[in-house]
Image: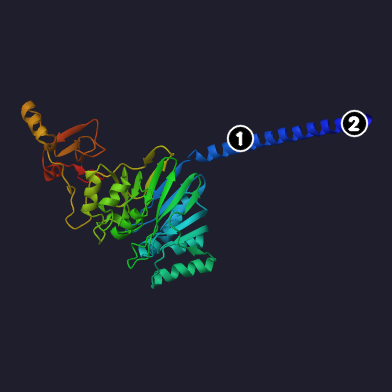
Amino acid sequence: MKRIYKQLLSIFLAAIILTGGIAADSMMSIASSTRAGNVQEKNTEAAKMEVHFIDVGQGDSTLITCDGHSMLIDAGDYSKGTAIQNYLQKQKVKKLDYLILTHPDSDHIGGAPVMITKFEIDKVFVSNYEKDNKTYQKLIQALDNKGLKYTTPEVGAQYSLGTATVTILAPNDTYDNPNDASIALMIQNGDNRFLFTGDAEEAAEQDMLENGMDFAADVYKAGHHGSRSSTSQKFFEAVSPSYAVISCGEDNSYGHPHAETLNTFRMNGVKVYRTDEDGTIIATSDGKTITFNVPASETWKAGEPNGNSSVWETPKSEAQESKKQETGEADPTEITYVLNVKTKKFHKPTCNSLPTTNRKDSTESRESIIAQGYEPCKRCNP
């Protein structure tokens, strides 16, 4: 009887221990699940991300910082290396998580040896197109001297930059044209999306579209400095940006940006920002909204010779003409300039820095206004 009692007692105690263990495991599982949920929730909450479109003249260089991490896309030509280094140091960048050199043209990789020498770099991505020239050789030599490995990232590969996600979109093939071999990528922070395509031209843009990925973006870094050889119609429609940034040099010999590209942006209501007009441009994303440190361009001035501020004019509708005749209202286009009688500056009627006080609307010619002692606004260049 005692033996049966002991056996029953042992079974009972084992059951208690087993039940307690299961309960403990369940509690640990719940706690782990909660912790994982917190981490996931934290990771999906976008941190502030800044995209610095650095003014390097006729070239490209973009610094992206997010949640303590940094990426540099391209590095201008060889004469801009030290200037970019100083800019990064001013932004308190000590290390680059990624250095992405979209393709081997000198205005994209020339300054890279300075970055490689002066900064710690985790990953270096280069195009699959190699050039046999001194600029490219200096790049490879700098990488070898630093012991840095470099690869061409695979299309579809994703990388983290703080709370942002970087997705590789190109190159999708090997090309005879180095521009088409550009690395293209999408950076997404929360709901905000930024697209970079290097100097990719229409052939590469078509290949990107055929890979079936999502190209919709809020901010589009205009391909090939705003050249007509990029931003093909189908590609633009797939991107459908709200903002476009053009990196180009003032009075550059290529005529960038071209009127065709500006027309595409203007006809579709895209706000344009240009380094040749505003210098370095900084876009800030909080995951929901994007703000810029400078106002959008109002000039719509093409870079070709004889480019002017009227690359595309909105035709007056019949309804507008009819309303003018019926009401006798003055046509707003008759106002040629807006004067600030205090500062003695004059503006285009479309300038976003129009005076709210001391204002005078004028229908006089530019020469007449200057003869009266007024100076043109440097922002809208009337």
Residue nearer the viewer, 371 or 180? 180
Which quadrant is the C terminus positioned in? top left
Q: Which residue is mark 2?
A: 4
Which residue is pictured at 6% across the width and 27% down the height? 326
Which quadrant is the N terminus positioned in? top right
* In the image, residue 361 above or below residue 116: above
Q: Which mark is residue 34?
A: 1
What is the secondary structure assignment of the residue under circle 2?
A: helix
> Residue 275 at what x, y percent from top left?
32, 51
Q: Is residue 40 left or right of residue 223?
A: right
Residue nearer the viewer, 177 or 91? 177
Which residue is pictured at 53% across the width and 41% down the height? 43
* In the image, residue 56 above or below residue 271: below
Which one is earlier in the sequence, the residue at label 2 or at label 1?
2
Question: Neighbour class for label 1 at 10 Å: few (<14), some, many (≥20)?
Answer: few
Q: Residue furthest left?
A: 325
Which residue is pictured at 18% across the width and 54% down the height? 307
Q: Amino acid at mark 2?
A: Ile
Residue nearer the viewer, 378 or 31? 31
Quadrant of residue 269 in the image? top left
Quadrant of residue 357 in the image? top left
